[in-house]
Image: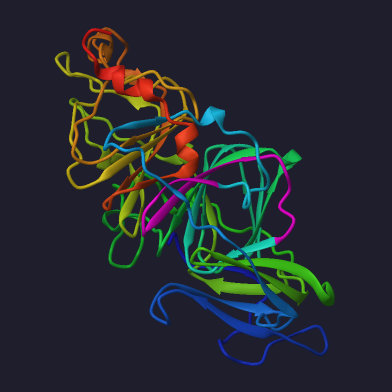
Amino acid sequence: MPSYHRLGQVPAKRHVRFQVGENRLCCEEVFGTEGFAGNYSILYHLSPPAQARSIEPVCSTAPEPWEPGAHRHHHLRTSRLRAGGNPIDGRVPLLFNEQVTISLAVVDQPQPYFYKNGTRDELVFVHEGTGVLATQLGEVPFRPGDYLYVPRGTIQQLRFVGNRGRILAIEANGSIDTPRRYRNEHGQLLEHAPYWERDFRRPDRLEARDDQGPGKFLVHLKIADQVYAYRVDHHPFDVVGWDGYLYPYALSIHDFEPRAGRLHLPPPTHQTFEGPGFVVCSFVPRQLDWDPEAVPVPYYHSNLDSDEVLYYVDGDYGARKVEVGSITLHPRGWAHGPSTGAIDASLSRPRVTDELAVMVDTFNSLRLAAAAAELDDLSYLRSWDVDR
C-alpha cells in the first residue's frame, strides 16, 4: 500500500463511542484483509453496514471456456467487441485461470446499482473515458491511462462522463500490491522504485450520504463467481470518516518511470503490480537500447513457466504491427518474439519508442473464454513465416 490515509471525521481512539451531530451514534466497521493480520481501515457509518431488507441470487459470472483445439499463440482483435452495457455487466471475460480473470468492457451505459466484489481484488485499467470511481471510502477521479486499484469488499460505482469508456479489468483471487522489491521493511517505496507515494491518488472526498428508505438501495455482491442482489435501507456511501491502509487508489501509467539500458532490458524491469500467481507490467515511452550493436526490439524467448498477455494501448510497438486495443496471448512452451522483418527494421530507426501497453504474466496456465473465439485472428500464426 502507498501509506496511511485519513479522510473525514474519526474519533481519537479506536473502538470507542463516536457521535456525529447531537445524538447520532456511528457504527464502526473494521474493513480488512487476511482476517485480522493484513492491511485494514476503520470506517464510521451512519447506519449498520450489515443491514439488508432482502437478498436474492442474480447470476453466475463464471467464464465459459473455449478450447481452440491446439496449443498456440493468439491475437485477439478486440476492436470487434461491440459496446455492451455498464462497467460491471459489460465486462467480457477473455482469459482466466483459478487465480486471475482478465476481462474487457466497452461501456455505453451508466452503472445502475452499487457493486461489491466480496472475494477478489480488482485492478481496472482505464483505456478510454474519464469519470469518478465512487466508493464508501470516497471518490477517486480517473482519466485515460489510470490503473484503478479496488480492494475486495469495496462498494463502488464507476461513473463515466457521458457513460462512455473502455476498460481492462483484472480480478485477482487475493491481494494486488506493489512489488515487494520496491519497498523497504516498513512498506515505504525505495529510491529505485519506478514511482513514488505521491503518484498514488487517494480518495479525496466522502459523499457521507444519509438517504434512507425500505429496500431503497440495490447492491450487487459478488462472491467467487456468484452475484447476489442486496436491498438495503441506507445509502451505501454513508461513511462520515475512516483511516487506515486499505483503500482504493489511482496510479497513472504515465507516472511510471521507465528504465533503459545500453542493451535490452527484460520485462521484469517494467513490473508495476504483483498479485497471486501473476504480475502486471507497464510498457511506456522511453529511450531504447543505445549501443550501436544493440537490437532495440525484444529477443525471442520461451516463457517456460508463465503465460504472457499483452494489451496494446497506444503508440507504435516496434516488434510487430497490431491494432490499438488488441490483446496477444503467448502461452508457455513455444518461443515468441518480433514478427518477421521487425529486427532488421528496428536497426535503422531512432532509439526511442512511444509504445504504451499493459502486460499480465501468469505463472499458471490461462484458458481462453468463449468470447475470445470470435476475436481470434488466425493470420497471427503467419507473422513469423520467413516467406511473408
Residue toward you, 317 or 10? 317
Q: Is residue 224 above or below residue 264?
A: below
Quarter of the picture containing the N terminus is bottom left
Of residues 289 and 157, the one nearer the viewer is 157
Q: Residue furthest left?
A: 293
Residue visible at 77% across and 69% down? 217
Above or below, 328 against 315 in this view is below
Residue found farthest to the right = 213
Which residue lies at the image location 54% right of the left edge and 57% below the top edge? 61
Q: Which residue is depicted at the point 57% across and 90% down? A: 15
Q: Looking at the picture, how far across and down is residue 201, in whole percent?
A: 55, 52
In reply to whether residue 143 is colored magenta, the answer given is no
Q: Position of residue 243 (x, y in %)?
A: 56, 73
249 left or right of 97? right
In the rendered image, is residue 209 in sight?
Answer: no
Q: Which segment is the magenta one?
A: 92-113
In percent of width and height, residue 227 lies at 59, 65
